[in-house]
Image (cartoon, grey):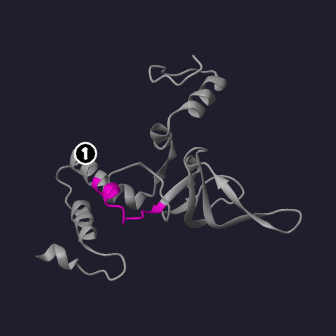
């Protein structure tokens, strides 16, 4: 494997080469590595198994010391492939609290942050591709498009 990133490289059993691939990947590919599995309800509703994590998604921790705890994603660091969750902190010896960082593969998304239209458009496209007869999830996405986050009412400029 060469020093710079290569898209032609497929796989290796050697962990050092796997780490090198992940470390040298460009940001647009590292973002794809930031995917987490979704809860059963979301899976049935939108027919997706994994999706990239975003700030304000509600997640459940699946591995480690904080297993089964819930919280909103506070920070997403794409370069280092890690996330921090609100309320999940570790105490240092001097008594100060520091955030605990998680790999997105070790969490499960319970609630999607649906104010991002580009993300919901991608989910809608995925639904149409996999199950064209499934209209329930599509209708819900289209409803959330026209609503504002604060009021929940349709935008006035879209009615005209």
Which residue is at 36% across, 66% downward? 115
Q: Quadrant of residue 87?
A: bottom right
Badge 1 marks a residue whose secondary structure is helix
* Figure quadrant of the C terminus: bottom left
Q: Is residue 53 left or right of residue 44?
A: right
The image position of residue 35, as x and y in percent, is: 48, 47
Q: Is residue 57 left or right of residue 2?
A: left
The image position of residue 114, as x and y in percent, is: 37, 65
Tell which residue pokes out farthest to the top in this image. Answer: 1
Q: Is residue 45 left or right of residue 139?
A: right
Q: Quadrant of residue 84?
A: bottom right
Crowd band around label 1 with a 10 angstrom C-alpha radius: few (<14), some (14–19), many (20+): few
Q: Quadrant of residue 124?
A: bottom left
Which residue is at 57% across, 31% downward? 24
Q: Which residue is mark 1?
A: 130
The image position of residue 90, as x and y in percent, is: 76, 63
Which residue is at 57% across, 59% downward? 75
Vertical relation: 17 (above or below) 132? above
**Which contiguous range is marked in magenta?**
110-121
Q: Nearer the viewer, residue 24 or 67?
A: 24
Q: Is residue 39 left or right of residue 68?
A: left
The image position of residue 33, as x and y in percent, is: 50, 41
């Amino acid at each position: 494997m060469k020093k710079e990133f290569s898209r032609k490289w497929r796989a290796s059993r050697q962990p050092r080469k796997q780490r090198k691939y992940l470390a040298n990947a460009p940001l647009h590919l590292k973002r794809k590595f930031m995917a987490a599995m979704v809860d059963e309800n979301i899976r049935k509703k939108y027919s997706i198994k994994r999706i990239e994590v975003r700030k304000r998604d509600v997640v459940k921790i699946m591995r480690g010391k904080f297993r089964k705890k819930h919280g909103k994603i506070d920070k997403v660091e794409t370069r280092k492939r890690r996330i921090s969750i609100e309320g999940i902190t570790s105490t240092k010896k001097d008594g100060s609290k520091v955030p605990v960082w998680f790999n997105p593969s070790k969490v499960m998304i319970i609630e999607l942050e649906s104010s991002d239209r580009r993300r919901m458009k991608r989910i809608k496209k995925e639904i149409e591709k996999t199950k064209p007869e499934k209209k329930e999830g599509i209708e819900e996405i289209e409803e959330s498009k026209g609503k504002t986050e604060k009021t929940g009412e349709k935008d006035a400029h879209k009615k005209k």
